[in-house]
Image: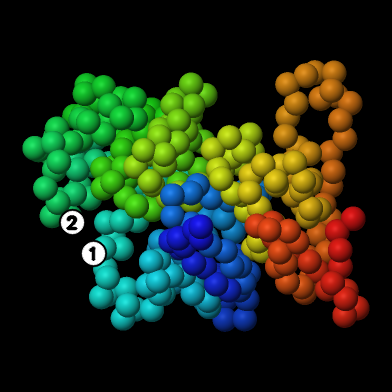
């Protein structure tokens, strides 16, 4: 049975213009698909282009070239976007990494959570906006005493949970989570990750999950994409990627995962990736569902060792 493609990204490129002659290519000609009901993880070091790609998918950035289709709608085409604007704004939500700057400091928590519903003129499923805000806060592990607090009165972890509750209040079909648990305590991280699992299994949510914690990505995600210097260098089912990494950068990334054994941790050797095979090439399917960047050298495709 073929999986239904929810998001189709083709040859996506985005660059930031610094001066008239200088530009930084943050995302470099990447292509991938996100299937309905799956959690796709995106990993890579800081500055690899993960967040920029996510913001292109959410129409926050306008890509320099390429296309992004959501339910077959080219969201980069202004005419198609305008024709489907309300659907695109309600069915897609994003959780930003920095909750401090993504929340309105002059609004109470209850108002922040209810704001998307008010903007979209949605009738609250639980009778009132305040009751809906209280339900969503309980969902992310906060009690009703936080309803009338301002973001400045909350800890970083509490603010992030308010941001998550705001996104979930719309019951979106597609949720982009950009480092959503980085500011949370470990126990709360587990609670939120299990919440994401629940939303996927029970409600059919589709996620793009961006993170640095590879162990968390392995636990949560169905497939994982690895980005390096704006390129998507490997994409595979999570189990396949962690057991059989093919690209040099993926191997170096996985070699840095801490081992909970002090003796083995001291003895292990980190693999260092030098970027030598990142030149011209193509994204190749080496086995069903496992794609890897193959660089071209002297007219031939370079195979990973």
Answer with the quarter of the image where residue 24 lies: bottom right
Q: What whole-number distance in Å separates the C-alpha atoms at marks 1 and 2?
A: 8 Å
Mark 1 crowdedness (10 Å alpha carbons): few <14, some 14-19, many ≥20: few
The residue shown at (34%, 52%) is 173
Q: Which residue is at the front of the view, 188 or 10?
A: 10
Q: Are marks 1 and 2 in contact (CB under 8 Å)?
A: yes
Is any atom of residue 233 visible in this view? no
The residue shown at (40%, 66%) is 70
Q: Which residue is at the front of the view, 47 or 244?
A: 244
Answer with the quarter of the image where residue 266 lies: top right
* Mark 1, residue position: 86
Residue, far top = 262
The residue shown at (31%, 63%) is 88
The residue shown at (86%, 63%) is 303
Q: Is residue 202 above or below residue 187?
A: below
Quarter of the picture containing the C terminus is: bottom right
136 left or right of 201 in image: left
Q: Position of residue 175 (x, y in %)?
A: 40, 50
Q: Position of residue 46 (x, y in %)?
A: 63, 49
Q: Position of residue 300 (x, y in %)?
A: 88, 76
Q: Is residue 299 above or below residue 112?
A: below
For numbered disc 2, what is the local secondary structure? loop
Residue, far front = 1
For numbered disc 1, what is the local secondary structure? helix
* Mark 2, residue position: 120
Q: Position of residue 179 (x, y in %)?
A: 51, 43
């Amino acid at each position: 049975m073929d999986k239904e493609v929810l998001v189709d990204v083709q040859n996506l490129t985005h660059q930031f213009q610094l001066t008239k002659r200088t530009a930084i290519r943050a995302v470099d000609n990447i292509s991938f698909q996100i299937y309905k009901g799956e959690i796709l993880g995106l990993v890579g070091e800081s500055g690899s282009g993960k967040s920029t790609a996510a913001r292109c998918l959410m129409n926050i950035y306008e890509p320099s070239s390429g296309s992004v289709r959501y339910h077959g709608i080219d969201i980069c085409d202004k005419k198609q976007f305008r024709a489907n604007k309300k659907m695109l704004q309600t069915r897609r939500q994003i959780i930003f990494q920095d909750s401090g700057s993504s929340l309105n400091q002059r609004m109470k928590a209850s108002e922040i959570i209810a704001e998307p519903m008010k903007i979209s003129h949605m009738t609250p499923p639980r009778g009132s906006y305040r009751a809906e805000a209280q339900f969503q806060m309980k969902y992310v592990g906060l009690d009703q005493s936080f309803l009338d607090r301002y973001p400045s009165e909350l800890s970083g972890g509490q603010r992030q949970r308010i941001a998550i509750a705001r996104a979930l209040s719309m019951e979106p079909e597609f949720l982009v989570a950009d480092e959503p648990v980085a500011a949370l305590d470990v126990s709360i991280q587990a609670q939120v990750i299990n919440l994401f699992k629940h939303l996927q299994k029970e409600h059919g949510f589709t996620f793009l999950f961006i993170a640095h914690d590879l162990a968390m990505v392995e636990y949560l995600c169905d497939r994982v994409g690895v980005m390096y210097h704006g390129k998507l260098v490997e994409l595979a089912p999570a189990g396949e990627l962690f057991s059989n990494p093919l690209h040099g950068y993926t191997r170096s990334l996985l070699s840095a995962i801490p081992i909970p054994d002090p003796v083995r941790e001291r003895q292990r050797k980190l693999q260092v990736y030098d970027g030598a095979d990142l030149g011209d090439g193509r994204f190749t399917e080496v086995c069903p569902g496992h794609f890897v960047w193959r660089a071209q050298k002297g007219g031939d495709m370079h195979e990973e060792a």
